[in-house]
Amino acid sequence: MSIRFRRAILPGIAVLGLALTACGGQDDSASASGGEGASGSVAVDGSSTVYPLSNAAAELLSEENPDIQVTVGEAGTGGGFEVFCAGQTDISNASRPIEDDEAAACSDGGVEYTELQVATDALTVVVNPDLDIDCLTTEQLKMIWEPGAEGKVTNWNQVDPSFPDEAISLFGPGTDSGTFDYFTDAINGEEGASRTDYEASEDDNVIVQGVSGTPGAMGYFGYTYFEENSDSLKAVAVDSGSGCVAPSPETAQDGSYVPLSRPLFIYVSNASYSDKPQVAEFVDFYVDNLPDITEAAQFIPLNDEQTAETQSALDGLKG
Amino acid sequence: MAAYAETAAKTVLATAGRDRDRSVKSLVFLGLLWFSLFFGVLVLVALIVSTALEGAPRFDSDLITRYSSTLSPERTGFRAGILGSLMVILATAAMAVPIGIAAALHLEEFANKERWYNKFIEVNLQNLAAVPSVVYGLLAVAFVTLMGIHQRGLVISGAVALSLLILPVIIITTREAVRAVPREIRDGSMALGATRWQTTWKQTLPSAVPGIATGTILGLSRAIGEAAPLLIIGTATAIRFDPNGLMSQFTALPLEIYSTTSQSREDFRVAAAAAIIVLLVMILALNGLAIFIRNKFQRSW
């Protein structure tokens, strides 16, 4: 037994150790050739809303240049900036512009960055399809979602006497989400200010199921989730003073769907862009192929003006 | 329910054929026991079956040979996650098993159990086994940062987190296995002039291998399903290359499943369901290996 044990186990451990150490780490310092044909790793993290977009960009690039190893995480917009400003990632996905305290953290960490808008999203307010409500004003939305409504606004006819006598059930993203930040800022006037007696989930599919399965339910999330589930949900048009506007790629692009159409960004570390050719190649590729990338990931593409802006921001980065 | 309990009870009595107690109380109790058993098993079976049915359209080779794909969701795969999970579990085993076994042997065979610090360690081992896994993720981050590694989401960070997570389990089960080796084996070895070290290495340890292997593999199969500590160490979810060493970035199957289920398109959810079955198969294979080793090397005295 003892001999058999040693014969079996010791070489096993040795082989394991060898296998793990011998193949070693990947070469992180990329070839200094620059431009096309670079190799090495690109670390992307941040918003889970932008995640599919950056993921699609990484996938398209890997078909052209498999030597660039792009990793995309989804720590959330806030979580992404935290590591980005500590210099641990090259690119941060964001579903809202960077905040002052995050910008301060970046300058403390010595990270200079460039903001590039990569797509547009129409934050979509959805209700259960059986609910007889097609349009809400921003005041009404605020009435339902503001912190003061907690426990008080519980029936649709409180919002407007002409609305049905039906209890309101609310679904929405959790507080770590950039979507939550954007919605509370646009509707309630203060980022993070929201009633808390709603079903919160980081997984938008849970919100989809909640709203489609609960009479009188309401929720909000990015446009793609509505598009995928348009047969079981109803999108509410939003009236911000100039009539009801339904969310759609067109109204988000031409800027008429206010205040809930929002830009989606990537933040690129200037140092990573200039020092790591693989980061530069990835970002250039991302911007140059934006129409294909947004289409593949089913996002709303930029309009011409926004495309020109992003392009000029990139030119500034190239220096 | 009562009728069901009665028939169930009769079956048991008929097969067991020993207990003749047929009072109402005992029948009700038996019924409750059966109900509990079926409840647990039924929920599990229902879950597995519904997941398997949902994922059925995607049980193809793309699922394990291709990387995740946003461009063609119907052909998305989990290659990076599967290889990453295997890699990190291998590294975890290489780290945790020798340390765990050595620690257990020391505590059981060499340490003076009367000393206060050994008692202290003993109590804390039990406590550590109950610590939430997220905490080990934080510990691992601190540990690798101290070692001077600042890159996020590396295999070594994942392996450290999972090693810390399963070390208490390995130590506790190894101690049990070592304790189960009869005193006479040690006495006999010592009587023949072997030193304490020789006795431990050549007699006690080999005799305890089945128990140690079982405990270790069950620990590893727990680790392979963990997502929380890996999230804390900054593991990315979208990766399009194979992990190639301790210093390589990786993603793990549970993380990839989690990320895939929250995508908007239906194809992704189907693929995720299929990947859940793949993960279950991996865990069952590990558990099967544990049972095989236990049966093959089991000794009785």
Image (tube, coloured by chain):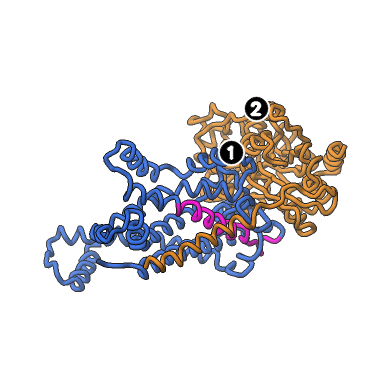
Chain colours: A orange, B blue
**For the residue marked with disc 2, what is the amino acid?**
Gly
Q: Tag 1's secondary structure?
A: helix
- The residue labelled by disc 1 is B145
Residue A145 location (% of width, % of height): 57, 33
The reply to the same-chain question for discs 2 and 1 is no
Is residue B129 shown to the viewer in this render? yes
Residue at 31% over, 39% down: B119
What residue did someone put label 2 on? A189
Which contiguous range is marked in magenta? B72-98
| Residue A169 can be seen, yes or no | no
Where residue A214 appears, x then y in whole percent? 51, 47
Examine the structure image and report whether residue B89 is included in the region drawn in magenta. Answer: yes
Q: Using residue A67 as the reference point, say whether residue B222 is left or right of it.
A: left
Question: How far is the residue under mark 2 from the one under mark 1?
Answer: 40 Å
| Magenta stretch: dominant secondary structure | helix
Output the chain of dot 1. B
Name which residue type carries label 1: Thr
